[in-house]
Image (cartoon, rainbow, N blue to C red):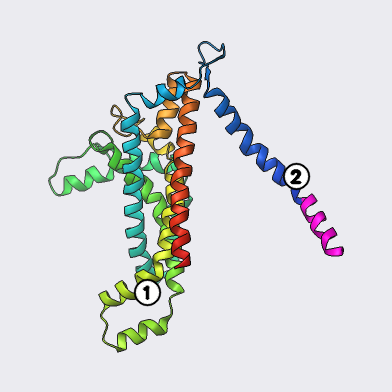
């Protein structure tokens, strides 16, 4: 009886926070879903029912295909850089080196930089073709400067976002790496296993779960990359660096079409949930194994 009363009291104390969280999540989503079925523009705020026209208009937009491909390239490119780079940095930091604590702080520091600030730093201090650091480095070896944001805009966005997420992957993989049994490594070394063999047959299988977690969490967040694109390339040149979130922004605040933008937002949410579902299935199988 007392246990049941304690559970009831605990649920009653948690109820306001849960209700507030549900309202905070459900109200914007419900409003977006409502407007996705309405003809509603900011220039003519007379709302009328549109059915599935907004969804058809958004999917048949000439820029939709390019936005989907750019989203895939962006997510895949950042994951490739962060997983491989994070694994390399984790192996490096795990070694006993002088100033190990300072090195770890420096490695994780980019993760605390705001996306807008990071994009501005890369745009003005590093990638600027006139006075950027990369242009200066090219001049030292007699090469012409590269206008990164104009010539290779999507790759530039990938580098900026990967720089921000690399510390996250490094921390997760470093934590998993430090839980590896040292006796297994010593036994393998005594049996004559080389560095490469130990890495392939001991380290990588041990890190497989951590790598899966990194891929899941990063993918969910990378599907919503927006600030870096807005600050640096503004989706251009043309649609060369436009992803789904930026296409939704274009429809809402540049074309003033709230209905079409809402439909795009719902499509983006559905895509993100589908990706998260399959990644969770993969993680579940990995954990069971």
Up-down relation of residue 224 to residue 109 (above or below): above
Disc number for residue 9: none
Q: Quadrant of residue 87?
A: bottom left
**Residue pictured at 39% horizontal, 55% vertical:** 166
Up-down relation of residue 273 to residue 176 (above or below): above
Residue occupying the far left of the picture: 142
Q: Is residue 253 visible?
A: no
Q: Are marks 1 and 2 in contact (CB under 8 Å)?
A: no
- Residue 220's x, y, as percent? 46, 47
Q: Considering depth in this image, is 204 or 287 the residue closer to the camera?
A: 287
Q: Considering depth in this image, is 215 or 136 the residue closer to the camera?
A: 215
- Residue 278's x, y, as percent? 44, 50
**Residue pictured at 12% horizontal, 46% vertical:** 142
Apparent side of residue 152 relative to residue 213 in the rendered image (left or right): left
Judged by its main secondary structure, the magenta piece is helix
Mark 1–mark 2 distance (CA, rounded to whole Å): 48 Å
Answer with mark 1 or mark 2, whichever residue precedes in sequence: 2
Residue segment shown in magenta: 1-13
Residue occupying the far right of the picture: 1
- In the rendered image, residue 4 lying in the magenta stretch gets the answer yes
Up-down relation of residue 267 to residue 157 (above or below): above
**Which residue is the site of mark 2?**
16
- Residue 53's x, y, as percent? 45, 19
Q: Quadrant of the N terminus?
A: bottom right
- Residue 192's x, y, as percent? 26, 86
**Which residue is the site of mark 1?**
95
Apparent side of residue 138 relative to residue 23 in the rendered image (left or right): left
């Amino acid at each position: 009886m007392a246990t049941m009363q304690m559970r009831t009291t605990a649920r009653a104390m948690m109820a306001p926070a849960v209700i507030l969280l549900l309202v905070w999540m459900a109200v914007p989503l419900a409003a977006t879903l409502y407007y996705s079925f309405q003809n509603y523009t900011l220039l003519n705020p007379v709302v009328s029912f549109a059915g599935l026209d907004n969804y058809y208009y958004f999917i048949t937009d000439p820029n939709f295909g390019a936005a989907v491909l750019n989203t895939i390239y962006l997510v895949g490119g950042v994951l490739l850089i962060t997983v491989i780079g994070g694994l390399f940095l984790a192996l490096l930091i795990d070694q006993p080196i002088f100033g190990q604590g300072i090195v770890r702080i420096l490695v994780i520091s980019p993760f605390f930089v705001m996306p807008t600030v990071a994009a501005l730093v890369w745009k003005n201090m590093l990638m600027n073709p006139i006075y950027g650091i990369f242009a200066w480095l090219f001049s030292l070896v007699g090469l012409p400067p590269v206008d990164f944001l104009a010539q290779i805009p999507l790759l530039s966005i990938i580098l900026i976002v990967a720089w921000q997420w690399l510390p996250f992957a490094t921390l997760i993989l470093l934590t998993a790496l430090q839980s590896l049994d040292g006796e297994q490594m010593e036994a393998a070394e005594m049996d004559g296993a080389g560095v490469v063999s130990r890495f392939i047959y001991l380290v990588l299988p041990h890190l497989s779960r951590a790598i899966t977690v990194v891929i899941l969490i990063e993918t969910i967040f990378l599907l919503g990359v927006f600030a870096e694109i807005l600050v640096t390339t503004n989706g251009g040149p043309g649609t060369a660096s436009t992803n789904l979130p930026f296409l939704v922004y274009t429809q809402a605040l540049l074309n003033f079409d709230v209905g079409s933008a809402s439909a795009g937002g719902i499509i983006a949410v559905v895509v993100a949930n589908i990706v998260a579902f399959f990644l969770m299935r993969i993680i579940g199988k990995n954990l069971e194994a």
